[in-house]
Structures are given as structure tokens and as C-alpha cells.
Image (cartoon, grey):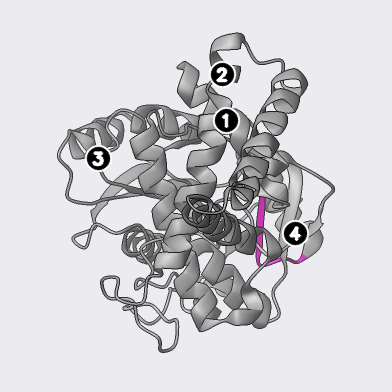
Amino acid sequence: MDTWPDLSVVMPAVDEALHLPAALAAVTAQDYPGRLEVVVAVGPSTDHTRRVARQVCDDDPRVRVVDNVDGSTPAGLNRAIEASTGAVVARVDAHAELAPGYLRRAVELLHETGAGNVGGVQRAVGAEPFQRAVAAAMGSKFGTGDARFHYGGPPGPVDTVYLGVFRREALAEVGGFDESLLRNQDYELNIRLRRAGWEVWFHPDLEVVYRPRRTVAALAEQYFQYGRWKRLVADRDRASLRWRQVVPPVAVAANLAGLAVGIRRPRALAVPLAYLGATLAASAIEAVRQDLPREVALRLPVAFATMHHAWGLGFLRGGADSGSASTGDATTSSGTVPVTAGR
């Protein structure tokens, strides 16, 4: 490329004092040839997230902090986008660490493909045994279905990507992130981008390290919320539903029905037993494929079952009464995202 566009990295952060330094360090260490700015939208936190962000600002003038009074992820993203100026906007979460060269390659792909959003592989990495088991489950088709961003695959157009690097004009055209969606706002945004004629492009060259939850309770809460808000998006737009999103609630309903009926008719226990067998078999296969140590492999069935059942229960529970979620159009509360570059 002859000219590199100005690039803005936007990062929402709430209670992320533990992970924020590594996330910001991975961004500021990027070898991007053009002008780079980082805008961190800090919400109300119970830890020292704001202090950590301010310390990075003091050390690097490219980093700025803005307030996210609402505290939600989509509101933080929109506040950061509004405060930024780059023709390209890269979303980065405080739980994520960009691989070297990520931003440069993402901008090259935007230029090469004409896409409105590009993204790559979410490489889950854990430190403790259970966290490593969750990371292994997230990299398995049995754990997460056929979404390429979990495990890689050939480059090309997809329904969604992890995080995303956007043309500002594409974000402006569709109105930014929907602040009524506390979760699943990235998937819903990509629906609107594709409907507006922009491609969402996956490429395995783009890799981001993600730090999974460390406990069963935290993982269950995370996936319950994922399922619940996915249901809300699906209720708005049935055509957006994919088979991988239907399997968990069907499995949960079948397992619960099998257990309930099995009290009187033991044959019905065949359903939950079949799920248990499939989970143990998939765990054994992944343990070998990923060369997992024993202490991680033994926790893998728990990670699979927690992800499946929490997501499925959340989807069955639904999100129609959640917070400020609306059933109207999916524009942000601010209405527009500033545009600085043409198509």
C-alpha cells in the first residue's frame, strides 16, 4: 500500500485491571506504518481499571481515555468510536491480545477485499488447568460449532468474525453498535453490515489471543448471557439463526426431558446418556489432538457441558425483558458514527 489510513483502536474496559495492561501493550507494540490512536472507554469499575488506563496514557500519547457512564460494552464501543478520528476502526477487548502484525495485515485485507469488516482467529489461551480446558473446548467444533473464527479455516466471506477491523464509513452507514444489546452486539452489527452490501471477511492471518474465564461459575454466567442475547437477536431476525446456535437449546431440552421422563421410564435416560457419551468421546479426541496434559483433559468434559448447557439455557430463557433491549430498529443511541474517509 502506498498510503496507510489513520487507524483508531477502540477498547471498552470495565473491571479489567488484571488484563488491560497486556491488551494495551499488544496494541501499542504493533508495527502499523500509519497514524495509530487508541481510545479506551472506561466504565464504572470496582477495581483499578481507570488508574491502569491512565498510567498507559501517561506513558504513550497515542492512548486516550474516555468515560463510558453506561458501562455496557456497546455503549463503550460507541463512545470510543465517537472520540476517535481514524478512517479505519479496530475493535479490541481488554481480554484480548493482538498478534504482532495484526493491524497492518487487517488494513491490507480491507484494501484487498473491499470488505466492510475483517477479522480472524480467536486463539483461546489459558494458564490454569480449568482455563486451559475452556480454551481447548473453544477451539473444538464440538464445543463451538462451525464458526471459523474459533479454529481457523480458509479466507473468505462469513456471517461474523471475532472483534473486527472496520471501515469507518461502513460503521457510519449502519449506525454503529446497538446499545440495547448487552451481548451479541458484534454479531448483530455484522448482520446489518451484510444487509447494507458490505462483506464481512475472515482471514486466518489475523490472530488474537483470548483469555477464557477461570471458573465454572464465571464460564456458566458468560455463556448463559451469550445464549440469552443470541435469542433476542434471533427473535428480531430469524434468518440470522445458524444451526450451531440451535443445537445447544435442543440438547438442553432433550437432556432435561430425558432425565424427567427417565424417573418412570428408564429408556428415556438414553438421551442424556448419549450426550454424556458424546461429550466424553469428544473430550478424549480433543485431548489427543491438542496434546493436553492429564489435569486439563480431565476438566474438558466439564468445560464442554458447561458451555453447551449454559448457552442452551440462556437461549431458552430468552432476553426479551432484558434491560433496555428494544424490538425496534437497531440504531445506536447516538444515531451516527463520525465519517472521515470515503469509500
- Give the residue at the far front of this rendering: 264
Left or right side of 23 for 186: right
Residue 28 seen in this snapshot: yes
Marks 1/2 in contact by CB < 8 Å: the verdict is yes
Disc 4: CA contacts within 10 A as few (<14), some (14-19) or many (>=20): some
Q: Which mark is residue 111?
A: 4
The residue tagged with tag 4: helix, strand or loop?
helix
Question: Residue at label 1?
Answer: 301
Disc 1: CA contacts within 10 A as few (<14), some (14-19) or many (>=20): many
Q: Which residues are magenta?
A: 114-122
Question: Residue at label 2?
Answer: 298
Question: Residue at label 3?
Answer: 15
Considering only order in the chain, which callout, 1 or 4, is on the residue closer to the N terminus?
Answer: 4
Query: Which circle, 4 or 1, is nearer the viewer?
Result: 1
Residue 218, how many percent across, how many down?
35, 38
Considering only order in the chain, which callout, 3 or 1, is on the residue closer to the N terminus?
Answer: 3
Disc 3: CA contacts within 10 A as few (<14), some (14-19) or many (>=20): some
Residue 224, how many percent across, how many down?
41, 53
Q: Residue 322, relative to residue 1: is it above or below?
A: below
Query: Which circle, 3 or 4, is nearer the viewer?
Result: 3
- The question of residue 164 being in magenta is answered with no
